[in-house]
Each structure stands twice: as C-alpha cells, then as structure tokens.
Amino acid sequence: MTQPSSSQEEQQPAAAAASHLQTHAPVSAFLPGGQFAMPLSAFVPAATTAAPWCSVQYYELKTKVGESYHASGPEFTIDGYTCPLAPNRFSVGALSNVNRCREVESVRRLIGRGVHIQRNADTGEVFLTNLSNSPVFLQAPCINYDSNPGVVVRLDVGSDKLLVFSMHSFLEKVQQLRGRWPPREALNRAQALCSIRLSFVKGWGHNYQLQCIMSTPCHCEVIFNEAYRELDGDLTNPALADMPSSMS
C-alpha cells in the first residue's frame, strides 16, 4: 500500500555523476536560437554495453558516504549488508563514516535486504521493490504519483514493485517544458527529472516531522545516466550556460 505526501523540496540532481558517461551521440533538446525540440523518437534503447545506466550515491544525513555505485546489469539491490564486491549489490553496511551518530546506526540496522531496482532496456522503464522489513520513502519526479511530481511515496513491507522512472515519460515531460519556461530554466527543470531519491525507515515532506531528505538518517540518490545523456548537448552548450535562470 502506498501513502503519498507532498514535498516542496527542490530537486538537486547530480549531473556530474553522469555527464561523462556516453554510449551514443547526445540529443540536443534545443535548436539554434533557443527553440526547444526533443522528439519522443530520440530515445533509442542502448545496445549491450558495460557503460553504467545508473549511478547511486549514499548519504547519512547531509554527508555523502563512500564512493558512488554504478550499475551496468539490468538489476541490482541496495542493502544494509557488508558485501562490497558483488557486482549486482550496493551494500551500504560495508561503508564507514567516522562521524556516524547513534540515530544513523539504528536506522542502518533496519535496512536489511533493502530495495531491488530493475531496468527494462527495451522500454526504458525502471521499477523498485522494497525488500526490507521497514518502510522505504521515495520521491520520483518523472512519475506523477497522485498527479504531483514532488510527492513522497511510502512503500511498506510487501508492497508491489513500483514504476520509478520511464524514458518515454521523461522525454514527454521535457517537451512539455518548452512552452512554460525559457530554455535555460527548462533545462534545469529537465535535469531534476533525471534521478530519484529514497530514504530508509524515515519519511520526509509535508506530512512528516522531517521536511528535507537531508535530515533523514540514511538515504540515496539514484541517477539515471541515460536521461542525462539525452541532455548532454545542452549541458555543454555555451549559449544556454549564459542564459539567465530563476533556478541558478
């Protein structure tokens, strides 16, 4: 069962983690002169390659802990165990933090089997399943749960797998930005669609005591590199870099 709650927190995608990873020519979302154009047909499923399709960053409160995990296979888990060498597991239990507090320690003990993330290379869809014995809280701005891109969804123990990203939806939403915002701001907002954030055990947002995900003890950002690659042409466009934006 999912219980949505609204969140006003601004998205902070980690573009640097994905901008250097490229398996096909980037598709520019903007034409010369600032005209916005990104056809849905621009997305071509990536060929079999070792290039990571997503990257994961693990945080304890405001501190990033350990190196980022890069997923090349179709599925992997984020768990609380100590298995640092398995290619299809990101075991955050193996990560050390000299400044770890008691609250973080107590939440880490509850992560257990964590979450399972699976990608369909043909459709560009990504699904997440809660495998732990504690709730997981998720914000996936590319998917409008309850018609609200900022909603925080609670995944209870035994919940069905949940769609958390769709390349088709991403490209469609990027197109919709063209009539609402100037090119630079549209690009910034498109970047916010390129990742999801999840917190173990503790929720955040309007209906929770914690208003910001950076206040939750253990949380992750999952960055979809293919989505960033679709924007690479604009991220490196000097003309767009000089355009003003209310988000900069």
Image (cartoon, rainbow, N blue to C red):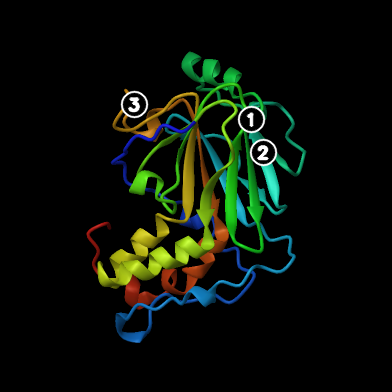
> Residue 1, how many percent across, how many down?
49, 31
Badge 3: how crowded within 10 Å, few (<14), some, or many (20+)? some
Q: Secondary structure at mark 3?
A: loop
Q: Give the residue at x 34% y 59%.
A: 189
Task: Please indicate whether residue 210 sits to the left or right of residue 68 in the image.
Answer: left
Residue 43 falls in which quadrant of the image?
A: bottom right
Task: Please indicate whether residue 66 sits to the left or right of residue 9 in the image.
Answer: right
Q: Is residue 132 visible?
A: yes
Residue 83 falls in which quadrant of the image?
A: top right
Label 2 near label 1: C-beta < 8 Å? yes
Q: Secondary structure at mark 1?
A: loop
Residue nearest the observer in this picture, 163 or 211? 163
Q: Give the residue at x 59% y 60%.
A: 124
Residue under numbered circle 1 = 131
Q: Is residue 242 visible?
A: no
Q: Give the residue at x 25% y 67%.
A: 180
Label 2 near label 3: C-beta < 8 Å? no
- Tell me the CA gap for discs 3 and 2: 26 Å
Residue under numbered circle 2 = 77
Amino acid identity at mark 2: Thr
| Chain-order first, disc 3 or disc 2 | 2
> Residue 231, how many percent across, how many down?
46, 68
Residue under numbered circle 3 = 210
| Chain-order first, disc 1 or disc 2 | 2
- Tell me the CA gap for discs 3 and 1: 24 Å
- Tell me the CA gap for discs 1 and 2: 9 Å
Amino acid identity at mark 1: Leu
